[in-house]
Image (tube, helix red, strand yellow):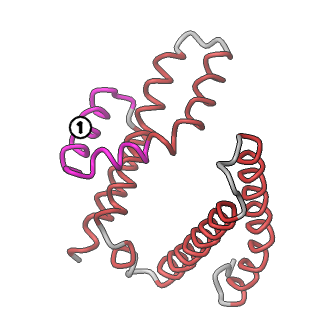
């Protein structure tokens, strides 16, 4: 039960943050999370900002363009909520064993195992792409070559995800995951 408490705390906090519209409350929770993350604060904060910057800026900009008079309040609450939940998620995943937290459910444990295996395969493939790109360049690649590499890699991973999703869905159905 001890290893499941962080998971329960995470769930309760995410539900609260999803319903909360109080900027001081969210700032208080974010401050608490920063305080308990200690030496990992900068690393987690950097990862949080990198992962939410583009989507949040798109949502914020589009809301501002729509001309709503309360767009600044909305943008503050929205961005703070996403930042806090993302920081909490990265903190929990860095400090806790997700397999122990989800051990109460065979289905969730299996889904977590599938997810981790896909992440590991993708990381290895990306690393191999990077090594291949570096080994084929005699000089430092220019921006055009770098953009082509990023575009080709992105296309590969998108295509792979689309192709393998059907196979995974069929495999999960055959194992009884979607018994509707």
Say whether residue 14 is left or right of residue 132.
Answer: left
- Which stretch appears magenta? 21-48
> Please, which residue is most extreme toward the front here?
138
Q: Is residue 110 above or below residue 134?
A: below
- Which residue corresponds to the image point at 74% horizontal and 53% vertical from the top-left? 149
Q: Which residue is mark 1?
A: 31
Identify the residue at the far bottom of this view.
Answer: 175
Residue at 18% in and 44% down: 35
Looking at the figure, which quarter contains the N terminus?
bottom left
Left or right: where does residue 163 sit relative to residue 128? right
Name above or below for residue 172 compared with residue 157: below
**Quarter of the figure with residue 132:** bottom right
Is residue 32 magenta-colored? Answer: yes
**Element under label 1?**
helix
| Quadrant placement of the C terminus | bottom right
The residue lying at 32 percent from left, 55 percent from top is 91
Quadrant in the rendering for residue 170:
bottom right
Residue 85 is situated, as x and y percent measured from the top left of the image, at 40, 46
Q: Residue 96: where, in percent of width, then height?
A: 30, 68
Tell me the residue at 43%/28% (across/down): 77
Horizontal and vertical percent position of residue 42 = 30, 44
Residue 163 appears in which quarter of the rendering? bottom right
Magenta segment, prevailing SS (helix, strand or loop): helix
């Amino acid at each position: 039960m001890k290893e499941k408490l962080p998971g329960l705390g995470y769930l309760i906090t995410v539900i609260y943050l999803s319903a909360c519209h109080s900027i001081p409350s969210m700032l208080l929770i974010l401050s608490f999370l920063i305080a308990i993350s200690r030496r990992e604060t900068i690393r987690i904060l950097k990862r949080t900002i990198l992962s939410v910057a583009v989507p949040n800026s798109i949502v914020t900009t589009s809301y501002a363009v729509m001309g709503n008079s309360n767009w600044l309040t909305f943008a503050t609450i929205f961005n703070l909520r996403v930042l806090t939940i993302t920081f909490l998620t990265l903190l929990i995943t860095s400090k806790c064993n997700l397999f122990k937290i989800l051990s109460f459910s065979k289905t969730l444990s299996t889904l977590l195992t599938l997810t981790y295996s896909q992440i590991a395969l993708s990381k290895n493939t990306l690393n191999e792409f990077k090594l291949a790109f570096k080994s084929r360049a005699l000089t430092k690649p220019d921006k055009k070559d770098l953009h082509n590499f990023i575009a080709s890699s992105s296309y590969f991973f998108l295509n792979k995800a689309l192709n393998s999703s059907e196979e995974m869905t069929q495999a999960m159905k055959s194992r009884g995951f979607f018994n509707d």
